[in-house]
């Protein structure tokens, strides 16, 4: 844990909590947007890549397999690199993944694993920064706001990518996303000095990898909660990932219209005043 002087310095510099919350929410949004790139563009891209649209489930599985493994190692990586460098690494991996996805099926598979690596790092890095800056009384609300980056990213993917693909072609649209991600990765370098001040360059990356599994085994009630959360998240992910393809392939919708439906379904959870937003933000006090 950082000492009181380090936390005070962190709050004084790099914009404090407000800037950190905006930056981490943006990083979460960009990482999630990348997860939805191929799911939203599958009607355009799948056959060009030599795949059928219903193979989309395997692509999403590759992402979350890599994200799960990365999450297990995230404590050691964070201690060695610091949250700013980890966020940069995550966004750079996602940007490189976009550039790989346009090269063909092999690139799309490799890119999916890279997206997972980045996605597995963004949330732990953001949590470490916000936990230092937010007071205990505000912490749940701050974390809830940061987590709205997930539906925001999904909504942006559905709202923007089909139109860009229809205008520019799906490959230029994906490359554009990659360029934005690489630019964001560079931009997060401004936080390195203040966010990464207590990193340990010699800390072993594998240290703490089993901490979550130990917690599941030793804390009563946690395995059931984890199972319920995993089932809910899996259902939400499956529905969100397949919405555009299902509407285009099965119902004959235009990709842009299907993307807007996906955007609305994702954005409902984060829109101010929606029941989903109040559940996330107001209900997070508990």
Image: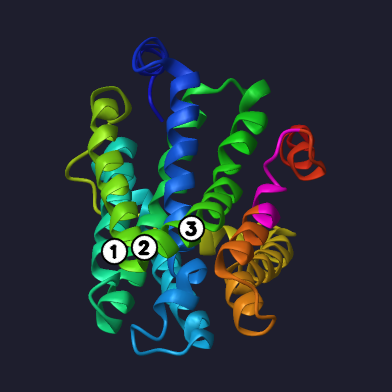
Earlier-in-chain disc, 2 versus 3: 2
Residue at the disc numbered 1: 97
| Residue 181: image tag | none
Give the side of residue 281 with respect to residue 42, left or right. right
Closer-to-camera residue (37/122) = 37
Residue at left 29%, top 27%? Answer: 191
Earlier-in-chain disc, 1 versus 2: 1
Quadrant occupied by the N terminus: top left
- Residue 142's spot in the image, x, y percent? 60, 30
Residue at left 69%, top 81%? Answer: 251
The part of the image, by quadrant, that contains residue 283 is top right
Dots 1 and 2: beta carbons under 8 Å? yes
Residue at the disc numbered 2: 115
Q: How is the image coloured?
A: rainbow
Secondary structure state at the residue bearing disc 2: helix
Closer-to-camera residue (241/191) = 241
Closer-to-camera residue (249/76) = 249
Residue at left 29%, top 34%? Answer: 188
Secondary structure state at the residue bearing disc 1: helix
Closer-to-camera residue (21/10) = 21
- The furthest residue to the left: 202
Q: Look at discs 1 and 3 and give the one toward the viewer.
A: 3
- Answer above or below: position of 283 versus 12: below
- Answer above or below: position of 248 versus 209: below
User: The magenta stretch spans which residues?
Assistant: 264-272
Residue at the disc numbered 3: 163
- Residue 210 visible here: no
Give the CA distance from mark 2 to mark 3: 22 Å
Give the CA distance from mark 1 to mark 2: 6 Å
């Amino acid at each position: 844990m950082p000492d009181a002087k380090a936390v005070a310095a962190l709050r004084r510099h790099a914009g404090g909590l407000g800037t950190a919350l905006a930056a981490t929410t943006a990083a979460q949004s960009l990482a999630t947007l990348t997860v939805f790139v191929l799911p939203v563009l599958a009607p355009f891209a799948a056959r060009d890549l030599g795949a059928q649209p219903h193979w989309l489930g395997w692509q999403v599985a590759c992402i979350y397999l890599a994200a799960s493994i990365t999450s297990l190692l995230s404590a050691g990586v964070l201690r060695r690199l610091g949250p700013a460098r980890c966020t940069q690494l995550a966004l750079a991996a996602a940007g490189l993944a976009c550039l790989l996805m346009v090269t063909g099926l092999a690139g799309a598979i490799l890119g999916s694993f890279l997206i997972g690596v980045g996605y597995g790092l963004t949330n732990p890095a953001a949590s470490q920064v916000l936990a230092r800056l937010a007071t205990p009384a505000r912490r749940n609300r701050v974390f809830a706001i940061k987590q709205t980056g997930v539906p925001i990213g999904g909504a942006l993917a559905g709202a923007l990518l089909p139109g860009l693909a229809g205008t520019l072609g799906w490959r230029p649209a994906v490359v554009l996303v990659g360029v934005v991600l690489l630019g964001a990765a560079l931009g997060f370098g401004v936080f390195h000095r203040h966010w990464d001040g207590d990193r340990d360059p010699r800390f072993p990356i594998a240290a703490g990898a089993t901490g979550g599994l130990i917690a599941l085994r030793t804390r009563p009630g946690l395995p059931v909660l984890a199972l319920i959360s995993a089932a809910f998240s899996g259902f939400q992910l499956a529905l969100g990932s397949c919405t555009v393809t299902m509407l285009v392939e099965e119902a004959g919708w235009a990709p842009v219209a299907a993307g807007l439906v996906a955007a609305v379904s994702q954005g409902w959870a984060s829109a101010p005043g929606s029941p989903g937003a109040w559940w996330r933000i107001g209900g997070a006090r508990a």
